[in-house]
Image: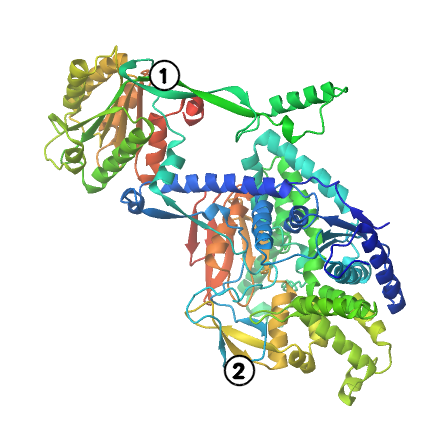
Amino acid sequence: MSPAAATPTAADLDRIDARCQEIAGELGFAVPPIVFHVMGSAEVYDIAARGLPGRYSSSRFGASFRRQHDEYRLGRSRIYELIVNTDPVHAYLLDGNSRVAQTLVMAHCIGHAWFFAHNGWFGPTDRAILPRVRGAAERIDGYMAAHGRDRVEDFVEACEAIVVHQPQAQLVHAADPEPEEDRPGPYDALFPDDVTARRDRIERAREDRVHRVPLRPDRDLLGFIEHHATGLAEWQRDVISILRSEQAYFLPQMRTKILNEGLAVLCHQEICQRLMLPAEDYWQYEQLNASVTQPHLGAVNPYHLGSTILREVMRIAQDPDDEERERWPWAGEVDPLEQVRAVCRDHDDESLLREHLTPKVCERARLFAFEHVQGNPRQIRVSSTECDEIRERLIAQHATFGVPHVEVVDADHGGRGELYLRHRDEVGLDPEYARGTLLQVATLWGRPAIVETTRHGDPIWYVAGPDGHTEDATERP
Amino acid sequence: MSVVQDTALPSGQGARDALHHSDRLRRKVTEQLKRRIGEEDIVAAGPDKRIRVPISGTKPWRFVLDRGERPGGVGQGDVRPGDVLGPPDGDADGSGTGEDGAGTAPGEELYEVTLDMDEVEELLFAELELPRLKRKPDPTTTEQDVVYDDIARKGPQVDKKATLRANLERNARRGRAFVGDVDRDDLRYRSYHEQPRPRDRAVVFCVMDVSASMNVPRKRMARLFFYWCVQFLRRRHEQVEIVFVGHTTEAWELTEAEFFGRVATGGTRVSAAYELVDEIATRRFPTADWNAYALHCSDGDNFAADNRRTLELVQRLVERFALVGYLEVDSGTGFGVQRRLSGFFADQAADLDGFVFATADDDRALWPALQRFFARQDVAGAVA
């Protein structure tokens, strides 16, 4: 074999892949063959910008491609691998990476592939998405040729502003309030006027429910617009459906980032430790491994947190203390890697954190909660190293992966065909972004759009028209 | 075999999209500039000053929670409660609070460009031209026309057709005529040479109402309008003659400094100005040798009795002039619309060929007005 730093040939990589697969099988992480593509940086960074190879042309991808590729060329960052959840799984390796780096990456990919195949959230994923993505790109090219690139891009940009608001992104539904019912009371005969008023009110509310669009608040913003906006052309509806279905592919990955990366790190560590690398290679491997799992000061490194949690799961399976025995029936009773597989099958990041972010994990991962320093957005003050506090913060961030709860409440607000959205979170929407996003919504809807939210605890309504006009209202418009 | 050296993917798409992004940025900047041409910081910017243009249209808009209200986050490191981390004041050191979970942090990107006035004008004036310019050559000077009519083996701009032909010929010489395997040797570039062309002579009359009814906001609008006219003419038509005329009930030819600084009092008689334009044009800029343009800006508060006379003069001017333009500022307030000159023109001169009039009630209307007067022939249809 060639020295550690040299670029491996396809045959080298094939041998490494076969050996990694063999070990993975012994560990209980057997996966169907992964197709590895070795590519130049321009191709790898193109896929990185798009998320899926061959996705439609957009200047947004162009901007992100240029930024990341420039970072790479300046030596400031390096993408080692990209993986696509299809059947078979495709992974894209950066040509020119050393043999040891490619080895780590290929072992890492086995973890992802196992996760894709077994995690419950990935069940509905369309594994034949690549040809569909290419077909969609061709259709969008056609629309650009027919209607002008700018017009199509403006429309795509408007859709992208809200495409992440899809049902799988936010499965928590608030229960509808129970509708009031007409129950006869013991004193009805004394207050006939009240009884009539009550009946009227109930009847009106019922009417209202029947005629209201949507019947109950709808969190699928773009889907709602696709089905209810009146002014959309056929190509525009097609663009919406393309963007929604491609987004649906990304949602399970967004909600399992910590767990998915945690398993991939665990896999590459377990496999690489069994490869019997020569000392020189092993040294290089450890450096790369450390750079992947290195904690960040101001944020959480999902690779590090995920693998720390899974290592804790393994320890509890093997060597629990009394408290842990009490809490988890499997503690001390199960093969550690079998328990890792069980966790990876059943959880997303939110439930993983609820179940397994223990004080021990917080300590091992050196987690802390912080607050922003008033008047200096770049500074943070450590507020706590308490596990409960940290868990609450992390769950709040990961429950909806940062997507605010916005729902369509009324498609005909004020009888003027205005789209009324309501936002419900502990804190309000960023005003600048709320106005900008709402303008895009109004463009799609073809009529004014309103979003109800709060600003420093007080209610506020942002209003935007398709003509580009916005205003802030402190009373319900 | 599970490792493939992949060539199936379309390559270069990322780079192409990056170029699209630059184009899009340019378009958005231009849109912003058009909306902002009334703002002081642009007008007051000297040639050396650089102005900052936020490109609101290019932000990736999302609903995000208010960072100012957000309770904070979670980090990793060896710290104790109470520790303050991060750069002491806003100075970037790269290690700040970067990644923040997908969707919460709008990508760090450039949403503001800094332009100098050259660039600002370049972007704006690409859409304007002196309309209906006829061949009226100036015997004393010439300008160079760039004519692309040649093929070269070196250059910046590939000629695809010539390249493919060279490729086909090379393949044919080797025995099989097909297009493919394009080689560096096949590359052909467009080449040009410069051809002297006589310069067409043009004169533009800038006529501004400086009477008492032109209050401060109206004067400001009128000056802004002429400021951009003059900037445009100087940049795109270096040799154009500009004649400045101010009027109340009388009219005077002014220097540029007087024109932009003049404050006068008195009533308004528009015909006086058009008479003066007519006279200067006849005396100094005979129609046979000059493309002549007149642009007049007023609040339209003319003596009613003078409207008829004004119209006669306009009708006479358009026969000889390439274009007569009239811009009425702030026409929405004060006097009834029907009494204003714009109302009268709308009634009497709407179809008059060579006469263009527009109204501007606020700064945002200035750019559309400029576009009407300096409509490029190829986009004239779209603007009208």
Q: Residue at x 34, y 47 (%)?
A: B50
Q: Which residue is drawn at 73% across and 67% down?
A: A285
Q: In this view, does B240 lie above or below B215?
A: above
Q: Specify whether A299 is left or right of A279.
A: left
Secondary structure type for disc 1: strand
Please give left or right for residue B177 compared with residue A67 in the image: right
Residue B231 is at least partly visible in this image: yes
Let me know if residue A467 appears in the view: no
Q: Mark 1 lies on which chain?
A: B
Q: In which quarter of the image is residue A342?
A: bottom right
Q: Measured from the top left, where is residue A453 in percent x and y?
A: 50, 60
Instruction: Name the kind of residue labelled 2 in the image.
Output: Pro
Element at label 2: loop
Circle 2 is placed at which residue position?
Answer: B81
Instruction: Estimate the x, y position of residue B30 in percent, counting from the top left.
Output: 42, 39
Name the subunit of mark 2: B
Looking at the image, how many numbered discs can be counted on the residues? Answer: 2
Distance from disc 2 to disc 1, alpha carbons, whole Å, reads 77 Å
Determine whether B284 is above or below A189 in the image. above
Residue at 18% in and 32% down: B256
Residue picked out by circle 1: B197
Task: Mark 2 vs mark 1: tell me if same chain.
Answer: yes
Where is residue A454 drawn, in percent x and y?
A: 48, 63
Is B10 rendered above or below residue A12? above
Look at label 1 and name its amino acid.
Answer: Arg
Comparing labels 2 and 1, the label whose residue is closer to the camera: 1
